[in-house]
Image (tube, helix red, strand yellow):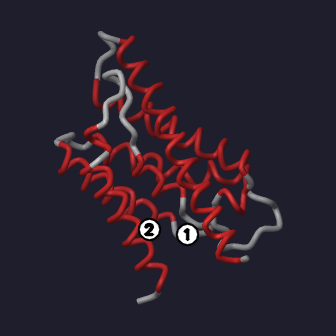
Amino acid sequence: MNAGLFRRLGAFALLFVVQMLVLNNIHLFGCATPLLYVMFVLSFNRNYPKWAILLWCFALGLCVDISSNTPGVAAGSMTLIGVLQPYILIPFIPRDSADDFQPTMRTLGVLKFAYYTIICVFIYCLCFFSLEVFHFFNWQQWLLNIGGSWVLTVLLILVIENVIRNERREQQS
């Protein structure tokens, strides 16, 4: 087994545990819940096999569904974002980049990584809360849930990615 698989398993477990033990208990203003496990999808390399992305995303979504009592909502949303992630990444990567290009704040730049994160998290939140509500009777609450969770999740991912980038910069110095 290679180190990349163990690193991915570690990220899977860490994001799952943090989401279940800490972030699922945060509901700012009754509508904003950080969905940090979406960060897992953002980290797949450029030419990572699409079938493997789907399996990883479905597995993480299924684990979240089982622990959060949201039958199929996270699994469906994670699978959708797993399908779309390689295509969303294409406009943001340089043309002459390596086949194993990993999208991080350091490799893409702050602005491109922020746009990439904003798009992926928005699609995820839109799908997640649409499946969770499954009707548009209370559309104001639906929009608040999408908007609040989207902003909170994007901010949390950007802060964590910035901390990781600064940590790597200090290690290289």
The kind of residue on which mark 1 rests is Tyr
Is residue 79 or residue 117 the one in the foreground? 117
74 vs 18: above or below:
above
Q: Is 124 positioned to the left or the right of 9 in the image?
A: right
Quarter holding the C terminus is bottom right
Residue identifier under label 1: 48
Q: Is residue 100 left or right of residue 42?
A: right
Tell me the quarter of the image containing the N terminus: bottom left
**Distance of label 1 from label 2 (alpha carbons):** 7 Å
Determine crowd level at label 1: few under 14, some 14-19, many 20+ residues with C-alpha closer than 10 A.
some
Residue 73 lies in what quarter of the image?
Answer: top left
* Mark 1 secondary-structure assignment: loop
Instruction: Pinpoint residue 14: horizontal percent, then vertical percent.
Output: 35, 63
For residue 130, side relative to residue 115 (left or right): left
At which x and y percent is residue 46?
Answer: 63, 65
Residue 1 horizontal side relative to residue 155, left or right: left
Residue occupying the point 63% across, 46% down: 116
- Residue occupying image coordinates x 74% and y 57%: 93
The residue at which mark 2 appears reads as 52
Contact (Cβ within 8 Å) of mark 1 with mark 2? yes
Instruction: Report x, y in % for residue 85.
Output: 55, 52
Label 2 secondary element: helix
